[in-house]
Amino acid sequence: QVQLVESGGGLVQAGGSLRVSCTASERTFSHYAMGWFRQALGKEREFVAAISWSGSRTLYADSVKDRFTISRDNAKNTAYLQMNSLKPEDTAVYYCAARGRGRLLPTAAGYEYDYWGQGNQVTVSS
């Protein structure tokens, strides 16, 4: 079992920035593709960003492309989501996810991920 622990959420003013982090319990983190998803109140969970195990390939939802950046530091077993130019519509619970060992490519499909973090509230005020 891979445990994913998130941190870095909070309250930020529109136009501001925030970075959320996700640390995995296994050193095999480097062999998982990672993703970030979010779920706003009253809405379905949606894809945000994903990154291959090597960090060489990334995917972004159109709604966050050019504002958010996903990255990873495999030596620390940690993935990051840097969120810039935040908007009130970015308010949601953010979840990190890991595809599972040996699943190296990023995907926007939630069902392709085997492990999920506990969720981290990000609130953007207007």
Image: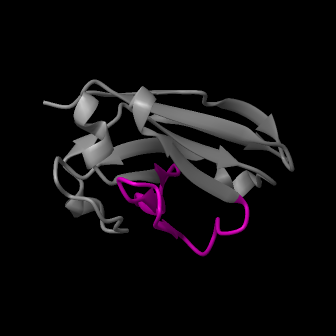
Question: Of 30 and 97, which appears nearest the observer?
Answer: 30
In the visual, does 84 lie left or right of 70? right
The residue at 32%/54% (across/down) is 33
Expressed as whole percent of the image width and height from the top left, the position of residue 57 reads 46, 67
Q: Above or below — where is 109 with respect to 35?
A: below
Expressed as whole percent of the image width and height from the top left, the position of residue 40 reads 52, 51
Q: Quadrant of the N terminus?
A: top left
The residue at the far bottom in this view is 62
Image quadrant where residue 50 sits: bottom left
Expressed as whole percent of the image width and height from the top left, the position of residue 110 reads 29, 61
In the visual, does 25 lie left or right of 6? left
Magenta highlight range: 38-67
Q: Above or below — where is 95 with respect to 66?
A: above
The residue at 45%/51% (across/down) is 36
Image quadrant where residue 28 sits: top left
In the visual, does 1 lie left or right of 108? left
In the visual, does 93 lie left or right of 74? right
Task: Confirm whether the magenta stretch covers residue 64.
Answer: yes
Question: Of 43 and 30, which appears nearest the observer?
Answer: 30
Question: Of 41 and 91, which appears nearest the observer?
Answer: 91
The residue at 58%/36% (across/down) is 20
